[in-house]
């Protein structure tokens, strides 16, 4: 009977299990591919049995100190500056412009990069998540049926991995608007942060399940996080600001991220 299960049947049956840790463990055990199933050691170290954090599968390594999440169209310059400065500090940074392998599908590359990183750094700006003219870059306009936004998906996956203990932390970088004098405004006072809707984007949740399964991590610990909850949870982490003089604030962010990793 199990042989004939599709992924849809498996998820439907597992949805009846109310304990999220038990559901995750069962989803790992019920893989058709034996190589994708956890061995006995990892079953016994699963948080459903231990009450602790998720144990990585053998072979999974922390390849990267930092994963940079950003909107290319609005924050490429900021991402470039951070990548170069953090790399000069000796940190290993996953940045799609440098780390995405030739011919690799972007979504597969980003997932593998985030799963093997220690910290997620989220670049947040008006152009990235509250764009005045491009609805697809404005979290305020998202609906249940919106297409999957890659930035929101990265953050959603990052929160899932943090809850499992697979990444150590999340660091939001809040970027204000740039004035004529080149100085950055206050991110919150100038209204860069969106009033995110309390709705679940179905395509994001579907992609999350797809990539967790692809990485051999089973079903999500937490189902159906709303856009508002994702954004507020990200902002609930200690982060840094691009406010005032550009060189001063960039240096402050670099110092904070470096200290976080070293600590």
Image (cartoon, rainbow, N blue to C red):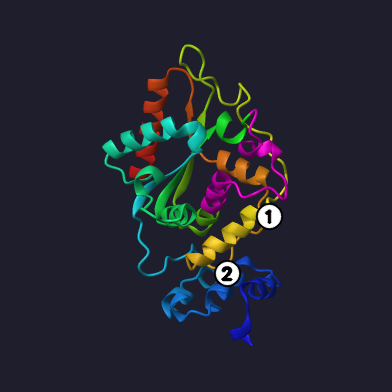
Q: Position of residue 244 (x, y in %)?
A: 47, 18
Residue 202's disc is 1
Q: Nearer the viewer, residue 62 or 48?
A: 62
Q: Which mark is residue 87?
A: none
At x 41%, y 53%, the residue is 113
Vertical relation: 188 (above or below) 261: above
Q: Quadrant of residue 249?
A: top left
Q: Residue at x 64, y 28 (%)?
A: 132
Coordinates of residue 50 in the picture (x, y in percent)? 50, 70
Give the left or right position of residue 90, taking residue 101 as reference. left
Density class for disc 1 (Cα within 10 Å; few <14, some 14-19, many ≥20) is some
Q: Secondary structure at mark 2?
A: helix
- Examine the rendered structure and indicate whether residue 76 appears above or below residue 23: above
Q: Nearer the viewer, residue 175 or 17?
A: 175
Nearer to us in this view, 84 or 262:
84
Q: Residue 245: image x %, image y %?
A: 43, 17
- What segment carries the magenta color? 132-159
Say whether residue 98 is left or right of residue 208: left
The reply to whether residue 204 is in sight is yes
Residue 258: horizontal and vertical position, in percent?
Answer: 35, 38
Magenta stretch: residue 152 in it?
Answer: yes
Q: Quadrant of residue 5?
A: bottom right
Name, please, the residue furthest toward the front.
103
Real-space CA distance between mark 1 and mark 2, rounded to the nearest whole angstrom: 20 Å
Residue drawn 65% across the image and 59% down it: 223
Badge number at residue 24: 2
């Amino acid at each position: 009977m199990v042989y004939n299960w599709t992924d849809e049947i498996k998820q439907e049956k597992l949805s009846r299990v109310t304990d999220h840790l038990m559901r995750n463990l069962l989803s790992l055990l019920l893989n058709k591919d034996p190589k994708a199933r956890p061995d006995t050691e990892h079953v016994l170290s699963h948080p459903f049995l231990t009450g602790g954090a998720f144990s990585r599968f053998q072979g999974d390594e922390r390849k990267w100190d930092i994963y940079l999440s950003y909107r290319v169209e609005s924050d490429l310059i900021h991402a470039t500056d951070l990548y170069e400065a953090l790399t000069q500090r000796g940190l290993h940074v996953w940045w799609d412009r440098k780390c995405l392998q030739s011919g690799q599908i972007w979504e597969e590359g980003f997932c593998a990069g985030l799963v093997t990183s220690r910290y997620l750094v989220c670049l947040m700006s008006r152009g990235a998540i509250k764009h005045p003219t491009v609805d697809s870059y404005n979290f305020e306009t998202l609906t249940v049926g919106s297409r999957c936004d890659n930035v929101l998906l990265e953050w959603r996956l990052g929160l899932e991995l943090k809850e499992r203990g697979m990444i150590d932390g999340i660091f939001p970088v809040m970027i204000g608007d740039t004035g004529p004098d080149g100085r950055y405004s206050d991110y919150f006072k100038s209204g860069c942060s969106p009033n995110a809707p309390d709705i679940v984007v179905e395509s994001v949740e579907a992609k999350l399940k797809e990539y967790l399964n692809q990485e051999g991590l089973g079903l999500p610990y937490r189902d159906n996080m709303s856009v508002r909850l994702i954004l507020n949870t990200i902002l609930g982490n200690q982060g840094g600001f691009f406010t005032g003089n550009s060189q001063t604030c960039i240096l402050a962010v670099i110092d904070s991220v470096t200290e976080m990793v070293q600590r």
